[in-house]
Amino acid sequence: MWWENEFVTARKRRLYLGGRSAEEIAGRHGTPLLVYGRRQILANYETLVRTFSKTSRLPLRVCYAMKANPHREILRLLRRQGAWIDAVSPREVEEALRAGFSARRILFTGTSLGHADLRRAFRVDGLTVNIDALEQLELMQELKKKEFREKTIRVSVRWNPGIGRGFNPRAITAGARSTDGTPIKFGVEKSKVLAAFEKASSSGFLPVGLHQHLGSGWVDEDYEVVSTAVDRMIAMASRAEKEGFRLEFLDFGGGFGPRYEERQRVFPLRRYAAHITRRIAEAGLRVEAIAVEPGKYLVADAGVLLLGVQYLKESYGQLFACVNSGTYNSLPRPAIYPQARHHIVHCGRVYDGKMRPVTVAGNLCETGDVFGKEIPMPVPQSGDILAVLGAGAYGRSMASNFNLRDIPEEVFI
Ligand SMILES: Cc1ncc(COP(=O)(O)O)c(C=O)c1O
């Protein structure tokens, strides 16, 4: 099957997770249940590191975008592999520290930060704070002068290269406007980047890096735009170096999509890595490290959501498997983003001769609460277990108690 990996496999028409029967796991722990596979996370991490190391001698900082899934076990696992962290709130920073990351390995990229957030960040010795706006820098300057005068605080600039890319308008994070017209709030625009470095430096901050993040969920077709943004980043870094700013790292952000759908052609990671390496060499940049910030690439396909079928319903010629969790309580992506498709597998009969299109409907009071529309599968019965694939990223981390429903338990295999 196109979706099989180290963690999710099919054997004799049954689904196995990390070598254990998905139905047995569901029987033991109950449903709904989020199941994660450690080995798949490690395999994804290794693939990324290996791909970059084939093209570049510069060290790669894999800064895990912990918003994808901040489970402490995942953080610890990645820390042991040598990962770094992309944190977007003070609490994420604190959680990463608790999981054993040194502050030196955390880049804090916030937006709409006020004094209270900044104070929490400045107290963490060694943390790097990403500047999202000149106006944010002004607040940072005020606070430094008042409360952190003697402290060396490492900063980088998150710039907006003027183009972005993502699987959904809401997941495009650079450019002037998203594809649905929403003005994009992130980053320092091109004409203000050098001023940000200068102001940071003159007010006693230590500028150490340049950062961009274009958006989320890239596939093969996104390569041209993404590589153009790499070129822009290199040009901006060259200008900063010429102005005398010594950049320790260039951070190209996250965005590489895992394979959610059969028809999807995955993002050409090796080509991307080679392009970054070549451009850095051509520009003669003196940077010490390249950073990337994968979230879903590392954890999405290492997680599965197991759901119990309550009953099968037929209505106006359509077949619904009505399940025992809601999207917003366990995996909100398909309800929030029309483009987010998750494959769903019948755990006891992965395939058989008679596949029918089944809509997997959650238990919330909202029409959009469907995990998958008209997914071909053997017709499920009450009590059967379904597995929603690609549930390791932005599942639990985005889940709420909407309708006062519980958020599923999480287990590791
Ligand atoms: C600053 C930043 N870096 C990295 C990511 C990770 O994105 P993804 O999970 O698509 O790799 C995000 C997510 O939107 C982000 O905002």
Image: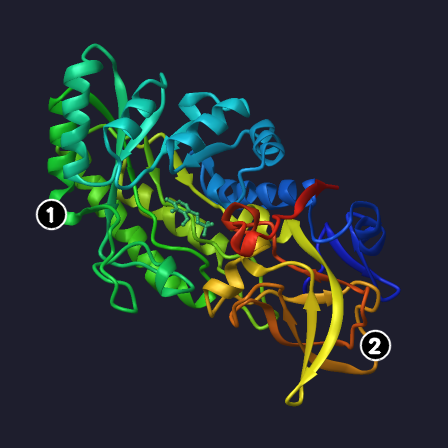
Q: For the residue labelled by badge 2, is the local secondary structure a helix, a strand or a loop? A: loop
Question: Which residue appears farthest toward the front when viewing the image?
Answer: 404
Asked if residue 97 lies left or right of residue 223, the reply is: right
| Residue to which mark 1 is pinned | 191
Asked if residue 88 lies left or right of residue 32, the reply is: left
Kindly identify which numbered label has been placed on residue 352. Answer: 2
Q: Residue at x 68, y 40 (%)?
A: 38
Q: Nearer the viewer, residue 400 or 3?
A: 400
Asked if residue 188 lies left or right of residue 88, the reply is: left
Question: Which residue appears farthest toward the top when viewing the image?
Answer: 150
Above or below: residue 48 compared with residue 386: above
Q: Nearer the viewer, residue 184 or 31?
A: 31
Residue 266 screen position, x and y as percent: 53, 62
Q: Is residue 363 visible?
A: yes
- Residue type, mark 2 in image: Asp
Residue at mark 1 to residue at mark 2: CA–CA distance: 59 Å
Residue 49 screen position, x and y as percent: 54, 40
Q: Which one is in front in this view, the residue at disc 1 or the one at disc 2? A: 2
The disc, 1 or 2, on the residue closer to the chain's N-terminal end is 1
Q: Residue at x 64, y 89 (%)?
A: 316
State which quadrant residue 184 falls in. bottom left
- Which quarter of the rendered picture does the N terminus lie within? bottom right
Above or below: residue 8 compared with residue 60: below
Q: Is residue 244 visible?
A: no
